[in-house]
Image (tube, rainbow, N blue to C red):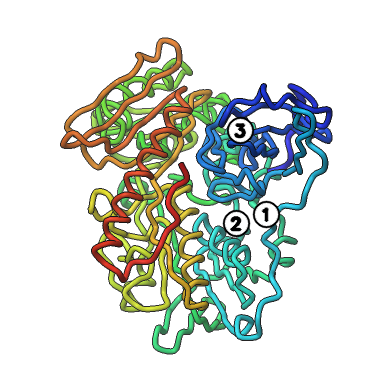
Amino acid sequence: MSDQDVVLSGPDFTKGVSMHSLSEGQLVQGHADGKPAMLIRRGETVFAVGAVCSHYGGPLAEGIVVGDTVRCPWHHACFSLKTGEALRAPALHSLPCWAVEQRDGKVYVTHEIETRSAAAPAGSEAQKARSVVIIGGGAAGSAAAETLRREGFAGSITMVSADNDAPYDRPNISKDYLAGTAPEEWIPLRPLSVYEEQGITLRLGVRATEIDVAKRVVQLSDGNSVAYDALLLATGATPVRLPPRMDPLQRVMYLRTLADSRAIIAACEHAGHAVVIGASFIGLEVASALRTRGLHVDIVAPEHRPLERILGTELGGIIQRIHEDHGATFHLGNALASVGGDHVLLASGERLQADLVIAGIGVRPDVTLAREAGLSVDRGVVVNEFLETSTPGVYAAGDIAQWTDTVSGHSRRIEHWVVAERQGATAAHNIVAHFEGAPREPFIAVPFFWSAHYDTTISYVGHADSWDETEVLGDFHDGRIAVTYRSGGQDQAVATIGHDILSLDTEVAMERAADTALQLGIESDSTLGRRKPLPA
């Protein structure tokens, strides 16, 4: 994404601010050196960092402080107050960070200091001899590559991706980019030059066809092969497709890649009526984008309320009303019978005009490569708490990874962008730790995702496969609502609209519960790795 124009507000910190005006943990908005900045007091220490999140430009001064970190209210990116370092996805890069001096009861921001970068380290000769191969160029794969360099890995990194595009902002291809409100230059996560500078080899448009775990070699679709000392599988998921009998003319389009989004945008130029099959998050985000482009949109789905299985009756009804208020038409409790040349036929017998048909009916984890390599596969690729598969030296992250949740004890496989990024980072950390003989870090991050529908964004923290109780805060008349999903009296997840701080506070509370469960596990199992406790 390109840098966005910002408006400076608040005091100029270089001219000084009274120490007494700074409350403990309060985020104070201002500016320094012509950049938006924040002052944060922790005890007698004051930090000064940038006030704009490096992900989507979120207002960090409206977030929360947790220990010596700040979290963005929009999508829960996390940064260090001490160094500005991007600590956790979806943060894209570090914040500006300034030196601070205290004189005569006032706090002065003096000069900007260099933040930690992910540049390729010098490393030891032994490290340089190591090689890591990452299969997949999505959220998990790109986060892993950057984390390897950030944590000092000096060996070779090769990312193999069937996608022709370098790692990009996948959530945006069904949101603003598809709607035409975000330019394509925002979509790449990094310029190609960054991968060259960091010594990360991108093998784009190439598939991994076979893994020889005994020889530690990956065969590629172009006839070449690449050896590894550690391997990360981040192959993601593929869209569920309609059976050929329903789409004999192969008119139906699917959205998974940037190329798919480009193709839909091109098709919109000659379309007036679109039919979206499926009221999933992807289906509804596509519907929102197409309505923003001015198309007439019909949404066909078998459920009685959109997203009811995931968000429940209350939020499902709200989402339906939001789409209807923007002109979309639902055909719920219905199913697709067939797709014709200029229409779709529903099971009810209704015929809908369709210049464009897009299906968003779910995805399946791409586990074929793992299964054929002999790795343990269930609903996904089975990994332990360190994201290592049944074969030592082979890790899995993202949509394919199936792990056991620390708190609930349930086996999880979650298809969220932020989860994939955080898993990729954890897997990379553990690869480096293994090479160095250091303790590894269990993956215990709390799941988080967001979904945008016109000007309404849903934030969802936690994970609830099912629930026996909900608690609703608000009624959305003022554009705000929060729903807590409980099972057996325990909070499983919280979905919010317009309650950013509640969403962040929920994430922190769930992390503390996970930390407690992990510490209990460490006491009973000395083989577990160590994790720094969550800051107070």
Q: State the mark number for residue 60.
A: 3
Q: Give the Cα separation between the discs numbered 1 and 3.
A: 22 Å
The residue identified by callout 2 is 167
Total marks shown come to: 3
Residue 497: name its quadrant: top left
Question: Closer to the N terminus: mark 1 or mark 2?
Answer: 2
* Quadrant of the frame with the N terminus: top right
Whether residue 173 is visible: no
At x 62%, y 58%, the residue is: 165
At x 75%, y 27%, the residue is: 105
Q: State the mark number for residue 190.
A: 1
Q: Are marks 1 and 2 in contact (CB under 8 Å)?
A: yes
The secondary element bearing badge 2 is classed as loop
Q: Nearer the viewer, mark 1 or mark 3?
A: 3
Circle 3: residue type: Leu
Q: Residue furthest front?
A: 104
Circle 2: residue type: Pro
Q: Give the Cα separation between the discs numbered 2 and 3.
A: 25 Å
Circle 1: residue type: Arg
Depth check: give the residue in front, 255 or 433. 433
Q: Nearer the viewer, mark 2 or mark 3?
A: 3
- In this rendering, position of residue 486 left or right of residue 388: left
